[in-house]
Image: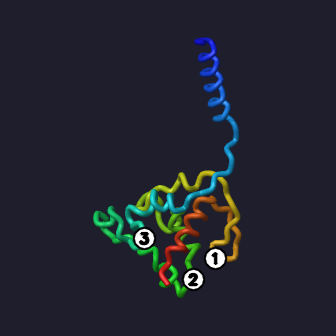
Amino acid sequence: MAKVMRGVVVAALAGLVLAGCLPKGKETPDPKQDFADYCAACHGVSGKGDGVAAAGLKKKPADLTVLSKTNHGAFPTTRVMAQIWGYAGAKGQGVMPDFAPLMAGEMVPYDGGDGIMTPTPVRLVALAEYLKTLQAN
């Protein structure tokens, strides 16, 4: 019986080791979870800039629900991507979190609104598309 159990344990461990070596399947990004993890502390669960960490910041976080409204009715995807990706200013000098984990993984062609299909991390695309759903009418 002990030999059988030891064999089962060895086989299970070998399976785990092999599973770690195999290429991972495509994972579907969860933009709502990414928003909760990276954005909600400052921007709030609803995106209005009223997160729990907002009070401790020198500058009030942007109300992400009015991005389209303040951009003549069009969602400013390129500007949003630039902010998330860190091109809107000197990286590391602002209060935006490091989005590096969102930039790892699969790249997809994405038109941020300028008519140019640009290779973009799929999780950033999903996050930008999620922000579009938060826009006030």
* Nearer to us in this view, 1 or 36: 1
Mark with earlier residue (2, 3) = 3
Mark with earlier residue (2, 1) = 2
Mark with earlier residue (3, 1) = 3
Task: Tell me, yes or no, whether the two marked residues, 2 and 3, touch with CB atoms within 8 Å.
Answer: no
- Residue name at image x 55 percent, y 74 percent: 132
* Nearer to us in this view, 127 or 56: 127
Residue 58 sits in which quadrant? bottom left
Q: Amino acid at mark 2?
A: Ala
Q: Is 84 placed left or right of 62 in the picture?
A: right
**Residue 8 image position (x, y, % from top left):** 63, 21
Q: Quadrant of the N terminus?
A: top right
Task: Tell me, yes or no, whether the two marked residues, 2 and 1, touch with CB atoms within 8 Å.
Answer: yes
Q: Which mark is residue 46?
A: 3
Q: Amino acid at mark 1?
A: Gly
- Numbered disc total: 3
Q: Is 116 placed left or right of 64 in the picture?
A: right
* Nearer to us in this view, 94 or 66: 66
- Residue name at image x 63 percent, y 15 percent: 4
**Residue 99 image position (x, y, % from top left):** 51, 56
- The residue tagged 1 is 113
Which one is closest to the eye, mark 2 or mark 3? 3
- Residue name at image x 54 percent, y 52 percent: 101
- The residue tagged 2 is 74
